[in-house]
Structure formats: C-alpha cells, structure tokens
Image (cartoon, coloured by chain):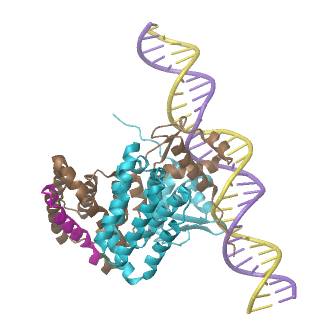
Chain colours: A cyan, B brown, C purple, D yellow
Amino acid sequence: MLETLPRRKIRDVIAERLKSYIISEELGPGDRLPTETELAVSFGVSRLSLREATKSLEFLGILESRTGVGLTVGLIDMQRVTNHLGFHPALHNADPQQLIDSRVIVEVGVLLHVSRRMAEDAALHAALQSIVDRSTSARKLEDWIDLDIEFHRALIEASGLLPLVAFGDLLQVFFRQFRDSVKKAEWKAGIASHQQIIDDLRDQKVERAALELTSHIESHRQRIGAKS
Amino acid sequence: MLETLPRRKIRDVIAERLKSYIISEELGPGDRLPTETELAVSFGVSRLSLREATKSLEFLGILESRTGVGLTVGLIDMQRVTNHLGFHPALHNADPQQLIDSRVIVEVGVLLHVSRRMAEDAALHAALQSIVDRSTSARKLEDWIDLDIEFHRALIEASGLLPLVAFGDLLQVFFRQFRDSVKKAEWKAGIASHQQIIDDLRDQKVERAALELTSHIESHRQRIGAKS
DNA sequence: GAGTTTTAGATTATCAGACAATCTAACTTC
DNA sequence: GAAGTTAGATTGTCTGATAATCTAAAACTC
C-alpha cells in the first residue's frame, strides 16, 4: 500500500536550505547572507515566503536582520531559548510543589559557586545587601515581591552560571503567582532570611546558607499546598 | 541622558501577545485560536505580519496550523528545538564550563528525589539499567552519545521534577557537540559510571552516587578546556 | 435508508506590487 | 577635519489576490 507524503510547507523547506547554506558556506556569527530578494529568486519563491522562513530562524537567534543592512548569521542566545521553554507543558502547567523543588535544587546548587566568587569580589555581597536594604522599606506587596524576585535572581547571578540565571528567571515567572498570598507578617521573616543567607555566604558558611535558603523557599510549601 | 529605545518589530510584539492570549484564555493543545484574519484585525496589523509571528511560534511547535481548519495550540517540541539548535555546533553563546557546572547542579540536585522514588518504584532502576545494558553494545560514537543523553535524561526524569527534565533537555542540546571528541576508550568508563550511579541510588547511597555523577560529568572538563 | 460522491464555504498558503523605515557610504558645506 | 545632507541599498509592513486544503452539507446511487 502506497502512503501519501504530506506536502511540506515551502517555508520549512526554505528554512532547512538556509541552514544548509550557512554550513556549506562556512558562515559564522555576523557573516552576511544574500539579500532577501536574491535568496527568494535563488529558491524560486516569493520574498514573503522567504521571510516566513527567515523570521522563524530569527526567532531562535539563528539569523539576525537589520533594516538597510541585510541578513546576518546570529548567535543562538540561551536566554532567549530558555524563555521559549516557558511554553513547555512541564512549566506551563507546572505543579507548584515541583516549582518549589526545582527552585531549591537550582538556588541551593549555586551557593558553592556564589561563595567562592564572593571571596574574590566584595561587590557581589554588596549588591545583594543593597536589595535587602531596599526590602526593609517596601510598603506594597507588589514592591516586596519584586524585591524578593530581584534578590533570588541576583543570588543565582552571583554564581556566574548564565544558563541557571536564565532558568531561574523562568521559574520566577511561574512562581510569582504564589507570592500573592504572602502575609505582611511574613515579609520581615523573609528579609531576615535573605540577610542570613548572604552573611553566611560572605563568611564561607555554605552549608548554613544552604539550610537557610532551603527553609526560606520551603516556607511557601504549606501555604501553597493549602491553596490547591 | 535619554537613551533611544529600539523599535520592536511588530512580529515580536504579536508573538508575545499570542502567547499571552493562550495563557489568559487558558488554552491547551488542540484548542482553536481565532482565524488569522480575526487576529490581524484585533491586533491592528496586516495578515502577513500576523503570519510572521505565527510561523515563528509554529517553528517551535507552540502553534499548529492546518489549511481550511485554522490555528490551534500545539506543544513545544523539544525534538524540533534540538534539531534547529544543533544544526551547527558553533552558533551559540553557551560557555562549556558553565554548561558542565549547570549540569552538575541539576543532575546531582535531583538525586535525593530519584533515590526516594526508586525506593517505591523498582521500574525506575530497571529503566535506567536497560539503557546501561544497551550502551554496552554501542558501536558508533553517535549511538553512544544518544544513549548517554538518554541515560542522563532518564535520570532527571526519575526525579519526577518535570521543569528540570525540560531544562535538562535544553542543556543537553547545547552540550551535545562537546561529546563529539570523546574517545572510544572512554566509553567503557562512562558506562561503568552509569552503572555505579544507579546501583548506589538503588541502595540509597545518595552521597556516593552524587560523587560518582559529579566526577562523571566533570570528566568532560579537561577535554573540553583543552579544545578552547 | 445507507453509503458514496460532489459541492460550497471556511481558512490557511503563497503570490505580486507597493510604500515606509532604517542603515551606510559618499558628497557637500563650513 | 567635522558636521550635515543625500542617494542608494535593504528590510519592514501593507493591500489585494489566487491557490490549496479541510469539513460539513447536499446530492446522487443502489
């Protein structure tokens, strides 16, 4: 029995051929491609169909385009790709308890790196301290949440591990909703935890910081559990 | 001094708004979106500009379209993302040493969860064992790499933490090229490590598994460092 | 009445032609 | 030489249109 092959969309064919062109011409980031018009003519399609393919490749950073200049080979940006990952069902429909577990693993996991880098660069502790200081004068829940998120991001950032910064940002997006029910009475405890953590790190007490951070993130567990 | 803000491309704005629409309408895979014409009118843009955005989202599997039917919500397809990102080894900005560190943090971080779940479900160990067994008969580097990736994915998967499974997949995409230089003499050692890790986990020796896994992932560090 | 074929309408896929916006190099002015 | 202007190149976005595909309803056949 012969099966019919699904007709491939022109744009998908063109995207593949653009990738092949980049490889065969040995192009790297910043290198120019032919103009849209030239490519459309070479591939025998309309310029707009060509653009549907190039815009798809641009979405991932594989290509870049500038008005007046042209198309160039891009650099795939991990932050961008990780951001798209937010549409993965594992995150989109994430169980809040899994978000907590994931945050614990990532944030506690970077502490050793943070501590090492703090020993060499006092500015890292200062940056985190600045956020803690600003947190003490937060009056609205929204502001407190922003500062809490900023603190946790800065913490991961202090590790220098960019992949985890990107992923941590993503987790915060989904986790944000669960902070809405934090009581004002808990703000102080949260801020005190932040202070404890960064001081422990500055003093090279990584295990102590890890316990405090775990406890801090875990503090959401019952409140969130009660909501679902 | 006031800085000029770069003008955002219409298609990028529309892509973001489509994602927001999906979330706010609580749409899931298979659910219909308004027609291209309706969306274009709602967003106040031409239908072709709307399509540049939708084709970008389709490129990742986030949307699907069928002639005569319309647009539906899809599922982000990691296989597709893998294929697109992996077509050229040098086109991303991920630092290999950071990828190693990130993998260690994620994979070692999940071990406690894996161990707990293994105690309740022997199938988890069996699944990993099956991958190790298949690895012993790998003849081509490509096959060995696939099985190595499969093993590490299954390990994270055994934790039940879906957000980390998705992120682990993404890390593997970027890491894949660095396995290309693994010598055949190292395959055996790698397989032995896999065996050691899963047996330690089965026996609730989490710290021992963690050390072995760290060492296993770190084994890439010098080889990769020497290349760059 | 049941099954098959055809048709109409809906919707995406792709096109041609056009003007707007942005960039860069060359030219002009001071 | 520095600053400003212009021309040309190229992408960004649009209007209007036809082609291709899908589905449900209508028509046809037995």
Q: Is residue A151 magenta?
A: no
In the displayed structure, B171 sits above or below B24; it is: below
Dominant secondary-structure state across the stretch colored magenta: helix
Q: Nearer the viewer, residue B143 or A217?
A: A217
- The answer to whether residue A46 is seen in the rendering is no
Q: Is residue A166 left or right of residue B185?
A: right
In the image, taking residue A66 as reference, residue B216 lies left or right, namely left
- Drawn side of residue A199 relative to residue B14, left or right: left
* Residue found farthest to the front: A185
Along the viewing direction, whichever of D17 and B151 lies nearer the viewer: B151
Q: Examine the image and state in which quarter residue A3 appears.
A: top left
Q: How many labels were placed on the picture?
A: 0
- Residue drawn at the location 46% of the way across and 56% of the way down: A185
Percent position of residue B184, x then y:
19, 69
Quadrant where the N terminus of chain A sits is top left
Range of magenta residues: B200-222
On the rendered structure, is D7 left or right of B61?
Answer: right
Instruction: Mark yes or no: residue A25 visible.
Output: yes
x and y percent of residue A126 in the render? 47, 77
Horizontal and vertical percent position of residue A80 = 48, 61
Q: Nearer the viewer, residue A76 or A1?
A: A76
Q: At 50% across and 63% down in the image, what residue appears?
A: A147
Task: From this view, report whether residue B27 is shown above or below residue A184.
Answer: above
Taking the spot 42% from the left edge, 82% from the top edge, the residue there is A121
Identify the image quadrant of residue B180. Answer: bottom left
